[in-house]
């Protein structure tokens, strides 16, 4: 964990932003995979981790805003737990590590919540996402579990978003140091991308690199030669020369900060001319939209910059036509780029998405678009120094989408469907970096994973 002062300061900031009542934060518990004692890898709730730092099961916390008191709830572990799972610090020791003065057994959580409720005090909590915590909240408030989703505190959630969006120096250092593992994961994939190797073998190797580098993967690995399926978790194909392998993979640092990078790799190490042409458009979209990424600029604008580079490049190849600005304004390019340029990244790969991605990524003056493509942009709002975001443009040829739009006669002024037909077997390309917004621009975190055509080809060939 970080030093005690980090957690004390974070909670102070939170106390200054939420007016009155009590703040309730629930940690996560183990979640059974197929029977109670065979559980998924434990992952602490990110909000709890951020404000209370304890990376263990069965904890909760309350901040009493009116009386300026903080309480850590949990129980000292039994001898049986020590025998099977190993020792832990005592609750008092854990509280001292994070600068919390008051410790209470878990059984007292409901008493404190119910007393506050009885007195008409506001109990603030963020939207829960795990069944176990929804059930616990249902018990604490004596409401049906279906009602719990109506109860979270917008005031608390907005305060958490406000604080967590700006990454502290210790967080930036943690994110940046873990980029070495991201680099190893992606160059490992490149070196393995040869004919006869399976997607499953590469996926397994990448999980190993992540674990060896400090933590589990930050989301299920996407490693597929059918890269046109945006979140393809099927790994059943064997690679052949001529395939493009899309690898979207990230790792959690020892303190659970995420990396999230995508590279698209020519199997065997040589792009075909057709692949190179599309690939270069995505490289350009990545680089040019990064140049547009700076404090004071809406990320929506950077997304539109990437969209225009993509539309212009596709027009040069005869796949699109007409006025580029108008094509992007009408959303025609989204047949090829149906997702957003990026999202915040931090303790979560889509940072704070448990709160609600529109709350995180938009603001009152900038509502989320409903237009196909732009509506998938998770982060639209004005960038600030020390935000960490992804930059991930892509071009995809999705047969079902092409067929549907063609049949509907959609955007025929801007899409050359006859030419597109001949690309329906192409697949997809996405290129994703993690970037830190700086005082007057931004920079890629860590050493950049090979991205230029020659560098990717050379890295693949070095693995033969
Ligand atoms: N890396 C997966 C995503 O950003 O959706
Ligand atoms: Mn991403």
Image: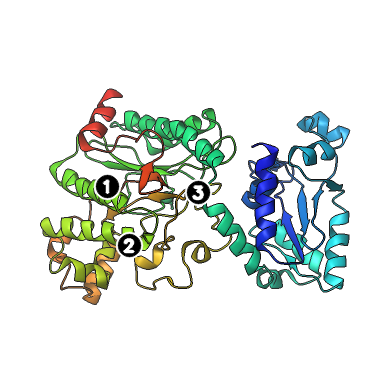
Label disc, if present, on residue 153 of the rendered structure: none
Q: Earlier in the sequence, mark 3 or mark 1?
A: 1
- Residue 212, visible in the rendered structure: yes
Which sits in the foreground, 197 or 214? Answer: 214
Q: Residue 460 appears at what percent x and percent y?
A: 28, 30
Quadrant, the C terminus:
top left
- Camera-side mark, 2 or 3: 2
Q: Which mark is residue 349?
A: 3
Query: Which residue is the site of mark 1?
Result: 287
Q: Is residue 294 above or below residue 255?
A: below
The answer to whether residue 34 shows anywhere in this view is no
Cβ atoms at labels 3 and 1 below 8 Å apart: no
Where residue 380 sits, quadrant-wise, is: bottom left
Q: Nearer the viewer, mark 3 or mark 1?
A: 1
Q: Which residue is mark 2?
A: 301
Mark 1 lies on a secondary structure that is: helix
Q: Secondary structure at mark 2?
A: helix
Q: How far apart are the alpha carbons under marks 2 and 3? A: 22 Å
In this picture, is 195 found above or below 292?
Answer: above
**x%, y% of residue 457?**
23, 32
Residue 123, image quadrant: bottom right
User: Does the beta carbon at disc 3 come under 8 Å from ligand 1?
Assistant: yes
Residue that appears at 56% across and 58% down? 162
């Amino acid at each position: 964990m970080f030093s005690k002062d980090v957690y004390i300061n974070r909670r102070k900031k939170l106390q200054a932003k939420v007016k009155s009542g009590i703040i309730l934060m629930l940690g996560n518990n183990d979640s059974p995979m197929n029977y109670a004692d065979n559980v998924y890898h434990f992952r602490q709730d990110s909000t709890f981790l951020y404000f209370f730092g304890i990376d263990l099961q069965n904890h909760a916390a309350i901040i009493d805003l009116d009386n300026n008191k903080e309480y850590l709830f949990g129980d000292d572990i039994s001898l049986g737990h020590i025998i099977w799972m190993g020792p832990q610090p005592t609750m008092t020791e854990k509280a001292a590590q994070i600068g919390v003065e008051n410790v209470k057994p878990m059984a007292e959580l409901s008493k404190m919540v119910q007393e506050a409720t009885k007195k008409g005090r506001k109990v603030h909590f963020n939207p829960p996402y795990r069944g176990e915590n929804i059930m616990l909240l249902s018990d604490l408030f004596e409401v049906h579990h279906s009602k719990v989703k109506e109860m979270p505190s917008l005031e608390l959630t907005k305060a958490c978003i406000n604080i967590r969006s700006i990454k502290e120096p210790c967080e930036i250092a943690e994110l940046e140091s873990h980029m070495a593992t991201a680099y190893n994961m992606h160059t490992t994939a490149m070196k393995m991308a040869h004919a006869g190797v399976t997607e499953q073998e590469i996926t397994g190797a990448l999980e190993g690199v992540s674990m060896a580098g400090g933590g589990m993967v930050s989301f299920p690995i996407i490693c597929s030669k059918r890269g046109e399926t945006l979140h393809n978790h099927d790994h059943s194909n064997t690679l052949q020369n001529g395939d493009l392998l899309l690898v979207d993979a990230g790792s959690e640092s020892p303190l659970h900060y995420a990396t999230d990078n995508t590279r698209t790799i020519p199997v065997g190490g040589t792009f075909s001319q057709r692949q190179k042409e599309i690939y270069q458009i995505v490289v350009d979209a990545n680089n040019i939209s990064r140049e547009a990424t700076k404090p004071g600029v809406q990320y929506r604008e950077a997304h539109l910059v990437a969209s225009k580079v993509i539309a212009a490049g596709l027009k040069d190849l005869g796949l699109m036509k007409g006025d580029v600005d108008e094509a992007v304004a009408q959303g025609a390019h989204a047949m090829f780029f149906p997702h957003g340029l990026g999202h915040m990244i931090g303790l979560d790969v889509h940072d704070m998405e448990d709160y609600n991605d529109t709350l995180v990524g938009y603001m009152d003056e900038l509502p989320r678009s409903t237009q196909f493509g732009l509506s998938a942009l998770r982060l639209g709002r004005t960038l600030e120094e020390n935000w960490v975001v992804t930059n991930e443009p892509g071009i995809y040829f999705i047969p079902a989408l092409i067929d549907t739009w063609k049949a509907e006669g959609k955007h025929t002024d801007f899409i050359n469907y006859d030419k597109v037909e001949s690309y329906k077997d192409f697949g997809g390309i996405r290129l994703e970096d993690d970037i830190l917004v700086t005082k007057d621009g931004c920079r890629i975190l860590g050493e950049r994973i090979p991205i230029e055509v020659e560098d990717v080809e050379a890295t693949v060939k070095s693995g033969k």
